[in-house]
Amino acid sequence: MQRLITFFTCLFFLTVPVMSAKAQPVSNEPAPNGEATTNGAASELSAPKQELPALVEELKGKSTTKKIETIRAIAATKSMRAGPILEAYLNGKLFKKKTDGTIVIIQKDGQGLLLSDPYSGKSLGTSPKNKYKKIRVNNRLRGVIRSVLGSLQLRHPDRLKRLTAAAAMFKSHNPKSIPFLRSALKAETDEDVKKRMREALAAAQLSGTNAQAQMLAIKVLENRGDKPALTLLQSATRQGASAEVKERAETAVRRIEKTLAYWEIGQTIFYGLSLGSVLLLAAIGLDITFGVMGVINMAHGEMIMIGAYTTFVVQEVIRTTAPALFDISLLIALPLAFMIAGSIGVAMERGIIRFLYGRPLETLLATWGISLVLQQAVRSIFGPTNQEVGNPSWMSGSFELGQLVITNNRLWIMLFALAVLFALMAVLKYTSFGLRMRAVTQNRSMAGSMGIRTGWVDALTFGLGSGVAGIAGVALSQIDNVSPNLGQAYIVDSFMVVVFGGVGNLWGTLVGAVTLGVFNKFLEPAVGAVLGKILVLVLIILFIQKRPRGLFAQKGRTVEQ
Amino acid sequence: MKSLKQLALGAIAAAALLGPTWSTDALAGSHSKKETIKVGVLHSLSGTMAISETTLKDVMLMLIEEQNKKGGLLGRKLEAVVVDPASNWPLFAEKARELISKSKVDAVFGCWTSVSRKSVLPVFKELNNILFYPVQYEGEESERNVFYTGAAPNQQAIPAVDYLMSEDGGSVKRWVLAGTDYVYPRTTNKILKAYLLAKGVKEEDIMVNYTPFGHADWQTIVASIKKFASEGKKTGVVSTINGDANVPFYKELANQGIKAEDIPVVAFSVGEEELAGIDTKPLVGHLAAWNYFQSVDAPGNAAFIKKWKAFTKDAKRVSNDPMEAHYIGFKMWVKAVEKAGTTDTDKVIDALVGIEVPNLTGGISVMAKNHHITKPVLIGEIQDDGQFDVVWKTKGLVAGDAWSDFLPGSKDLISDWTKPVSCGNYNTKDKKCLGAAMAK
């Protein structure tokens, strides 16, 4: 179906003379006033210049098939406004007034709606929300609009628009668009865009019937070497114009498949590292409270949750007071989350845990009770439903590195996890607080007799661990739900990592987290997510049987205490 | 696994904390006002399911308050008895028993997960009481004491697949059935797979994938969906992913750049409440199939939303499909009690069949003999404001079918709780009622 549509689309562009966006002056069509109730028949009668408003009116209709025709006709009007109107329609910004059906383009602005006239682009002021109804667009129409826009914008002055246009043309790979792509390619100066256009051209040629052009196209696609190129080449092995082409396509397919297999392993490793970094973030704080202090802290997950909720609150405040700061909301949330989670940690230690040192079972129950209290408290304050934490622009989307798809948020979280780990190591190693902390955990009575206030060191250590968990919450809010249950999802994983890596050893935590992450991601495609998780747990149990102290066991006298 | 044990422990502790306050409340009520008719509300207010179920408790309180303003029922006031089963399945059974035996409620509105419903079933049968179950479920069940006001598979899953197969839906030829690993997705996917095979879809064009509850790391699965979709045929994803796992799933979809027009995802468990936690701009065009959307333009719906926002004192509160199911269920129960003139369980059960109540989307829902109701099926597209825009709906209302026509075991079964059949699993071939023999 889609091919048929694109076929028609391109047909349109072959019948109308190729137009350049720059060459056409802005056509000043009359803006429709209130009584714009034209129908299809009227549009046929009117002169070509007036067609656009009439055609746009047709978009209000119900039939998708009819709308597709209309979209193609709009593109064929040669009007400068056809592109912006279709783009608005694609993004759901084309509205009609409920009372008289006037069509407007609406941009959402923080408080109200900014209206503009679709035919002149002039602003029409603002309006309250409920007076307009969106003109409906569905997935089938979006596909059509995108490919129509592709051909419209192949010569757009904006480089990014040309890139998307070339990508859309690659996707539709219609042989009818070959001359069109050729002429666009000639006029193109940017190397990146040129490359994309050449690939789009090759894709179109491969779908054509010219054996010679197909041979050249196969070469271009082979160099592109990604999954979509592979799919095209695979179809060429069946439908190539000559036996020679088919054979050439087959070698190309084999070569791409081979390299893609390597890339796939690379991709899985990236996924594994990314999962590992999430595990690491969740576990670092626990490595302090559980690993260094020996407190079985079941409320650790809730500290992560509190960090995530801090991010939510910070973003809410920013949204209402200073929307411009949104992109740095996470940076603002970081110190706040550390302080809030940290002070709750200190309060917990001073209020409850310090009376329970040396009684692990009671500590477990007490901290677990605290975790329930914290969860229910958050539930009562913020409600049981998920809260929306937005991704700043620099954390959304993805980019390609060779054939690897690297998602930005995962990459940042990876870097962030490492930064937190090394910062924490530096604190432990080079600051006087770190020195005292190590002294107290290694030999409490000796540290006490040297004049260290062991009680306060305990409280601050616990606060540090909790604060780090809070920081982790800020990062995890970017990839997970922000709900009162957030912490529960991570507590088991955190303990798993700390125990596996070796209690009280930050390097062990790093290696443990990354090993588990990569291992999990290699298992997942093979045995499925459910069984994969079980297998990991089983393997850890077996591993702990063999090495009860984990990967990096602490050695020396202090261990036995 | 560890997390389950924890969950169970947590639930017990939470129940211990919350339980007494609620039940004493209820007891105090029963002493002072003997005249009230009691309605049980059995929804988790803590634990993992609180995210979805708390809202349903609020709706019930609103409906009961509203009914009392109208003068109550049979000249008596209604009284809500709220208990918290804390997302703990065995506790659901205990709390149900407490509601019926101790608080003497006349009907219970409650449960969300299928496992919680299965857990309370024996209690309702033993103590002969009425349960209204408001959530879409996998079917393959029909009990005399339960009224299913949510969708059966033929009222949600099958029409959604039909839509994706149609030209407007994108003529999908290749299918990914992704779900959370428990009974509802497994049964639904079994039905869907049988349906797709019957429609001529090849076995190799169907990919089934299950993930654990609360699955947070979707990178490999989304990548494998992408790979599955790149084989040249139009691919669609049918998602029965439940609860919290949806947010990271959709976030990953958006980040890996999967657009709705390339690979549309139609979800059966994602409603307005679930979307409240996501930035939906990258998700515009993905779909959900329900019997109700907040955005439906109907006078009854507008009035309901207005009341709901006033009741919760929160202008941002959204309404969703299970809320409408409770709305319909409650109105049906009120009508049936009025018709029967008593709250006696057996009489109300008999009176309920055939009761008609206007639903919120502008139609009239009827309680059928199999204790399922008629509903319209709507396909909504996610919008950038977290709401759904209806892109397709069935011509009329669809009657709920308890026993799927696409599973070998249930093809010949029907459910009819009126005389002379009075059976939840009557085999039309053998003309025999299987009774409790196959309940398990």
Image: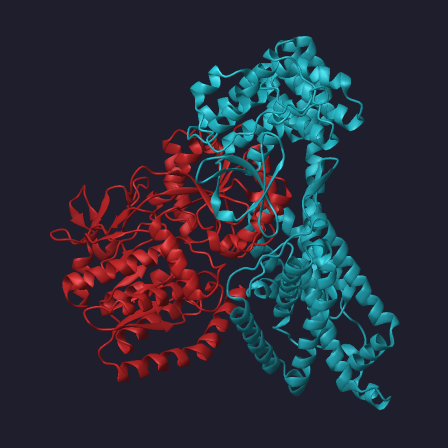
Instruction: Give the residue at x 36% y 43%.
Output: B377
* Residue at the extreme left: B420
Q: Nearer the viewer, residue A278 or A64?
A: A64
Image coordinates of residue B159 in percent, x first then y, are 37, 39
Query: Looking at the picture, does residue A440 appear above or below residue A403?
Result: below
Q: Chain B: give its colour.
A: red
Image coordinates of residue A430 in percent, x first then y, are 88, 71
Quadrant in the picture for residue B200: top left
Q: Nearer the viewer, residue A35 or B303?
A: A35
The image's colouring method is by chain
* Residue at the extreme bottom: A449
Chain assigned cyan = A
Instruction: Give the residue at x 26% y 54%.
Output: B142
Quadrant in the picture for residue A441: bottom right
Q: Nearer the viewer, residue B346 or A491?
A: B346
Asked if residue A247 can be seen in this view, the reply is no
Quick one: quadrant of the C terminus of chain A?
bottom right
Q: How many marks?
A: 0
In the picture provided, is A158 more to the left or to the right than A234?
right
Image coordinates of residue B222 in percent, x first then y, are 59, 43
In the picture provided, is A368 more to the left or to the right than B435?
right
Query: Looking at the picture, does residue A334 appear above or below residue B388?
Result: below
Query: Looking at the picture, does residue B260 appear above or below residue B248?
Result: above
Asked if residue A445 can be seen in this view, the reply is yes
Image coordinates of residue A168 in percent, x first then y, are 63, 27
